[in-house]
Amino acid sequence: MGSRTNLIKLPLGDLELVGYSVAGEETVVAAPGLDVCFDIGKAPEPLLSVNHVLLTHGHMDHAAGIAYYLSQRDFREMAAGTVLLPGRLAAELEQMLVCWGRFDGTQPPGRIVPMEPGQEYEIRRNLFAFAFATNHCQGSLGYTVIERRQKLKPEYLELPGPEIARLRLSGVPVTYTMNMPLVSYLGDTTSGDFEKLACVRHSKILIVECTFFDQDHHERARAGRHYHFDQLASVLKQMKNEYIVLTHLSRRTELPHARRLVDQALPPELAGRVHFLMDRPIRRRRVADP
């Protein structure tokens, strides 16, 4: 474990994504500035310092490095890592860590946080992870990282500070809560109700898998509950995201071919917002698609 994966760095405005994603092999996507890592892949060494792993489901290519991540943080005298994951997997992960402790001699410490659709977790002050159901395997989740700020109500904007303070002390609610969805990560999935969520549709960054592009792979996509690009294209036309990042491409898909299909299928303005996490061709090898 402890992958030496060649991580991609993708700057998107004032945020940067760092990760690697090839279908069936490894998927790990971090937003270090937000202190979150979506899935953990094989636990690449540069991402061990990220304090929160938001695990979408238990498939090996997304979750295999979780024990190593926790163990290495302990070995390096970092604070115990926090793992958010689908509620049905929490007991299994805790049991796995107990077994690993017997195998290794030391149980990896970590905070395991079971999540259900609609729940949120405070990452740090004013920053929250919101979980929603996806459509890949039993209990799979996606996450939106939301910044929450208190804003002064418009009717009080012209008042001097002392007057606003007086109103506050008298119990008048002078502010309102503004939720700003920063990053939504869908994990592996096909279409589902989550596509209608405002936090997903309006996230600054939407990270979405697109495993299949070829016309003869529609059945593969349906069988594995993955997006095919023909399906995803119609979904993206409804999204308002500033940046859309496609992940989880199969090794069967040539990146220049996928880029051409995106440019052909989407209006130019929308196509210009679409990025590939893997921004260079992936060396092909004989592997079975998921």
Image: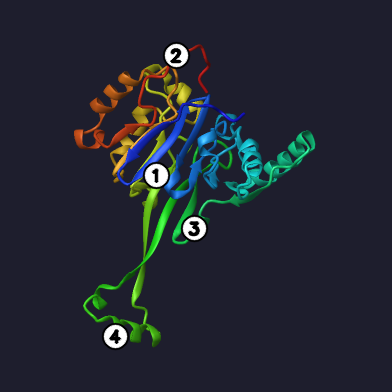
Query: At which x and y percent is residue 26?
Result: 52, 28
CA distance for labels 1 and 2: 32 Å
The kind of residue on which mark 3 rests is Arg
Q: Is residue 252 left or right of residue 235?
A: right
| Residue 163 numbered tag | 4
Q: Is residue 6 left or right of residue 243?
A: right
The kind of residue on which mark 4 rests is Glu
Q: Give the residue at mark 1.
A: 195
Residue 205 shows in this picture: yes
Q: Are marks 3 and 2 in contact (CB under 8 Å)?
A: no
Q: Which numbered disc flags the more N-terminal residue, 4 or 3?
A: 3
Camera-side mark, 3 or 2: 3
Name the foreground residue: 115 vs 169: 169
Q: Give the residue at mark 3.
A: 124
CA distance for labels 1 and 3: 26 Å
Question: Circle 4: is it few (<14), some (14-19), or many (20+) Cα within 10 Å?
Answer: few
Question: Circle 1: is it few (<14), some (14-19), or many (20+) Cα within 10 Å?
Answer: some
The kind of residue on which mark 2 rests is Arg
Query: At which x and y percent is residue 269?
Result: 20, 37
